[in-house]
Amino acid sequence: MTPQPLPIVSSIRAPAPPKPDEAPVAQAGPDQDVTLGTLVTLDGSGSTDPEDQVLSYVWSADESNPSTVVLTNTSIVRFTPTQPGDYTYILVITAGSTSSKPDSMHLTLRGDDNST
């Protein structure tokens, strides 16, 4: 009898599909309660991306805020508000082509007489 060739078995696997880009997580920093004339710091430096991509920051102010300020699109923003009241600031970060859910921080700015 003639020997029969053995079947060839391939163990090549198709590459795994790429993982979907996970969304970064925005952290707008803690709420603050300060008096008029105080320098306020919005701190988004605690924001993260699961893939450690470079982050872009976009801060915005709620339209109901008592006064407006110019916000820069950096991780940390500093300003001195000029009118007492309750303020909300929102941070959205982007890593690559994926954006975070918004995160907000609340600022209570009290006047010299402790009023808002």
Image (cartoon, helix red, strand yellow):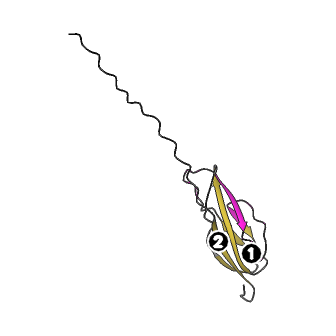
* Pointer 1 local density, CA inside 10 Å: few below 14, some 14–19, many at least 20: some
In this figure, which residue is indicated by the disc labeled 2? Answer: 105
| x, y percent for residue 31 | 63, 74
Q: Which mark is residue 81?
A: none
- In front of the other: 33 or 67: 67
In the picture shown, does residue 55 fall above or below 89? above
Tell me the element at label 2. strand
Tell me the element at label 1. loop
Outermost residue toward the bottom in this view: 113
Amino acid type of the residue that numbered disc 1 sits on in the rendered structure:
Asn
Quadrant for the C terminus in the image: bottom right
- In front of the other: 34 or 93: 93
Query: Which residues make up the magenta segment?
Result: 48-77
Amino acid type of the residue that numbered disc 2 sits on in the rendered structure:
Met
For image coordinates 54% across by 48% down, the residue present is: 20
In the picture shown, does residue 32 fall above or below 3? below
Quadrant for the N terminus in the image: top left
| x, y percent for residue 110 | 72, 83
Q: Is residue 3 left or right of residue 29?
A: left
Tell me which numbered mark, 1 or 2, is placed earlier along the sequence.
1
Between label 1 and label 2, give the one nearer the viewer.
Answer: 1
In this figure, which residue is indicated by the disc labeled 1? Answer: 65
For image coordinates 60% across by 60% down, the residue present is: 47
Q: Check contact, mark 1 vs mark 2: CB within 8 A.
A: no
**C-alpha separation, residue under disc 1 versus residue under disc 2:** 12 Å
